[in-house]
Image: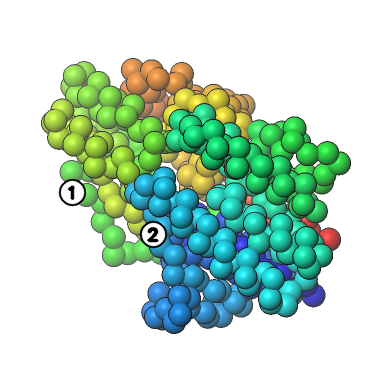
Amino acid sequence: MSKVLYICQHYSNAKGSAGVRPYIMSQKLVAKGHEVTLLCGSYGGSETGLLEQKFVKGCRIGNIEGVKIIEFEIPYSNKISFVLRMIQFFKFSFKATWYALTSKYDKIFCTSTPLTSAIPGILAKLFRQKEFILEIRDLWPELPVEMGVISNKLIIFMLSTLEKISYSCADKLIGLAPGICQGIDMKTNNKKIFLVPNGSDKKIFFSKENNFKLPNNIKDDDFLAVYAGTLGLANYLDPLISVGNILKQKNVKNIKILIIGDGREKKRLANQCKVLELDNVIFLDPVNKIRLGKIFRRANAGLQILADIKAFHYGTSPNKFFDYLAVGLPVIVNYEGWVADLINEYKCGISVSPNKPEYLAEALIRLSKDKNLDDMSQNSTYLSKLKFNWDQLSDDWVNIVIN
């Protein structure tokens, strides 16, 4: 048995609306007989299992489903400014580092984002000779630099230096997408690099939920396309507003777009809909995974939307895509890369050119009339079982971390 210290600033179980990868992985460690202490912050929309407890001296602690969770009182959401985000990142890193340098454990596992979550692992490796495993969920600083979020040369230099030190200190490195593993490989020598993407969890999405109803303006016979995720700059959901307007101009009334989530762009996007008087684009606040499963089971297609940024093409492992597959939804993707490649190869949806909302609108119209939609749905389910089964992926992940 190993004692694993799991560093994850953004953590949630299945009762929250955030991604559940750390929850699934920590649970698999426990199921395999290992002892897990998980450090996290207070992430907007998450559910740590400790919400009924009060913070005492900046943290709250509890044993939840066999995992000792220590939640620091460091609030974070996608609505806050970049500067405040950086402050919260370093606050969490400082507190996690103190615990990493003073507590008893065998291995330290750190997962980004943010990359500052790697700092406790670096210092535990250097000063305590602990085995350090690092998981990279987004390439920093490449991704925010390409997005234009970071332009200050000093900050870019500091983050690039942290990236190199993180990779060089880690005993093992795990990437969530092919492009992430390639990006790591370009910056480190003789390292063990492993690909473990996100997965599809049918258990969560097929749980019973009887007390949740869709908005009244979604009719039973409407073709429903759903987007579930963050409403931020990286996601760039403006094309969905354009699609709604195109459908309105074409007098297509049986297609509805449901946008579920929160973020800095939500208010602006909703205002655009009001100005255009669109009743076919509907916004819904974040819901937990169980309720999300009910919505997905009603939906006819999943929307995988991102800004047209090269780093996204092969360098992201989007939770929502695997969630769509879990329920057997055909997927429409509007950017190139490995997700589009999978959709085309397994014929489980449609890929359209980026920055072409008219193509996206035509894809929705085509799917709404497609008599072979069940074939796409079956292919989606097949792909989830073949390549993205959480049980198998989490087994692989545990073998990497422990052995």
Measured along the vertical axis of the image, is residue 5 above or below residue 193?
Answer: below
Q: Which picture quadrant has residue 312?
A: top right
Marks 1 and 2, the one that precedes in the sequence = 2
| Residue receiving disc 2 | 45
- Amino acid marked by disc 2: Gly
Q: In this view, does 337 lie above or below 83?
A: above
Q: Where is residue 244 in the image (x, y as percent from the top left)?
A: 25, 28
- At 41% from the left edge and 47% from the top edge, which residue is drawn? 83
Which residue occupies the foreground of this view, 371 or 99?
A: 99
Q: Is residue 94 above or below residue 60?
A: above
Which colour scheme appears in the figure? Answer: rainbow
Q: Helix, strand, or loop for circle 1?
A: loop
Q: Which residue is drawn at 15% across and 35% down?
A: 274
Determine which quarter of the picture holds residue 253.
top left
Residue 143, can we see it? no
Identify the residue at image location x=67%, y=69%.
100
Mark 1 and 2 residues: CB-CB less than 8 Å, in contact?
no
Return the residue at label 1: 216
Residue 401 has which mark? none
**Secondary structure of the residue carrying numbered label 2:** loop
